[in-house]
Amino acid sequence: MRINQELCIGCGECLPYCPMGAIVLETDAAEIQWDECVECGICIRQIECPVEAFYESEETRQWPRSLRKVFSDPTAKHENTGVRGRGTEEVKTNDVTARFKRGFFGIALEFGRPGVGTRLGDVEVITRTLAEERIEFEPCNPLTFLMEDIKTGVIKDEVRNEKVLSAIVEFVIPQSDLERICTKIQEAAERANCIFSFGIVARYEADGRLPVVERLEKIGFTVPKNMKVNVGLGRPLKED
Amino acid sequence: MTHSLHRIGPESSFQEDYVFISRPAMNFNHVGCTPKIQRILEILFEEGPTNMGFLSSQENMMIGFDQEELIAKTEDNSPVMACFYEREKLVNVLKKLKEEEVGISVVVTGLVDKVEDICNEVGLTPHSAGISLGVLGKTEQLPAANILCYTTMCGHGMVAAGLAKQMQQAVKDGRMSPEKASRIMAKPCYCGIFNQKRAEKFLESQK
């Protein structure tokens, strides 16, 4: 996004709305720090600029900057990567898709959230580690598409510096690998130059228990009580 | 695998916070789903959620929307997203969806014991659970916890820390009511899962 310097009256009303804090007012007119902007579009959509100074420039739509918008603007589509949405439907439709079956766990690492953003290249500290562990990255995920080689987890050079609000790494592991993979992720996180939210999806057991919680607590995670539960209303119900 | 999963705040703040998301599974059961999604919307409109949003039209309950127009614009892959402050309203929605055998997947994010209780009351068997294991990495980059409790309520990170700080200060200074401040914060969240009643409580307690 850009602010038309001729139009801006420097009222500063827009400053707090940017999730990246990329709008600054250092002269008579507000400016967007171009390299910090993730093109989420909240400024142009939500701020009631009295002079309508915000505009989307042609550069926003040019590769590789165009990636910023599709990874950051929830109203945009992943046309560059050929994948819709930031990731899969994960637990939301698991009763119908059986994406995560009993005996397996789904893992999602959402980089840049909450509220910080990430350079796509910074994700590599984790994707390389996971690749060494022979993780198979989710093919229906736009970040997987941006890897030079999914066997190494290396991100393509041309996109490394693009800053986005959110990029999700998704994969499935057998239950037996839980402790090993979680520990590897924790170790790699120590070297990270960015943040990520760590999520896991588990099937309820037939007796209604979620034994994964106890296993996670044993390896040092504090498991919050707030969870996202698929309540089993989807049809046809796909059994494991 | 995220969206409503990583809401931050003390456990007590989730006592009256339930996120409802329903969507068909693409390439599994989405074809011809429009009438089913429209029925889900009707049921939600009947019960009256705390907030509700639509990415396609970039609207939520704080911005305002035309119910009939939204129903008319529904497509086979439209998601339905809302949040509830009142448990009973959510229970009623789930009961109707079960009775009418609508057949579209639903996730409810909330305190797991309470969500399981609701499932038990409605006669549902919880299928799977998304579990947050927190934020890792360079966490010194994060805003303070008393700001994250607001910003993490938008499933797409559209509520800025700067806006939360500004609203918090306006309430502290007595320039704005918690209700008005929470409604302003909820506007950028088009997925409509920003629970402005929960935000109001935070603002009251942070005065």
Image: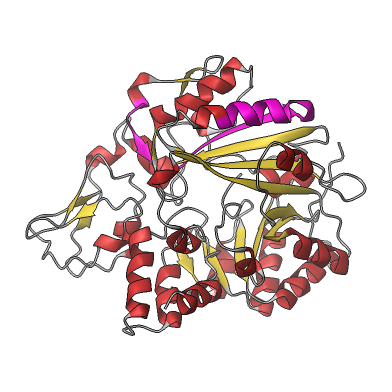
**Magenta includes A88?**
no
Number of marks drawn: 0
User: From where the camera sits, is residue B38 visible?
Assistant: yes
User: From where the camera sits, is residue A138 visible?
Assistant: no
Say above or below: B62 vs A70: below
Between B154 and B94, the residue placed more toward the observer is B154
The image quarter in which residue B106 lies: bottom right
Locate the C terminus of chain B and report the quarter of the image it occupies: bottom left
Between B96 and B12, the residue placed more toward the observer is B12
The stretch in magenta equals A159-186
Between A52 and B174, the residue placed more toward the observer is B174
Answer left or right for B127 relative to A118.
right
The image quarter in which residue A79 lies: top left
The residue shown at (56%, 14%) is A151
In percent of width and height, residue B124 lies at 86, 60
Say above or below: A89 vs A53: above
Say above or below: A45 vs B50: above
Between A101 and A214, the residue placed more toward the observer is A214
In percent of width and height, residue B105 lies at 74, 53
In percent of width and height, residue A182 lies at 64, 31
The residue shown at (45%, 28%) is A191
Answer left or right for B20 relative to B191.
right
**Magenta includes A178?**
yes
The residue shown at (38%, 66%) is B164
Locate the N terminus of chain B and report the quarter of the image it occupies: top right
In percent of width and height, residue A132 lies at 58, 15
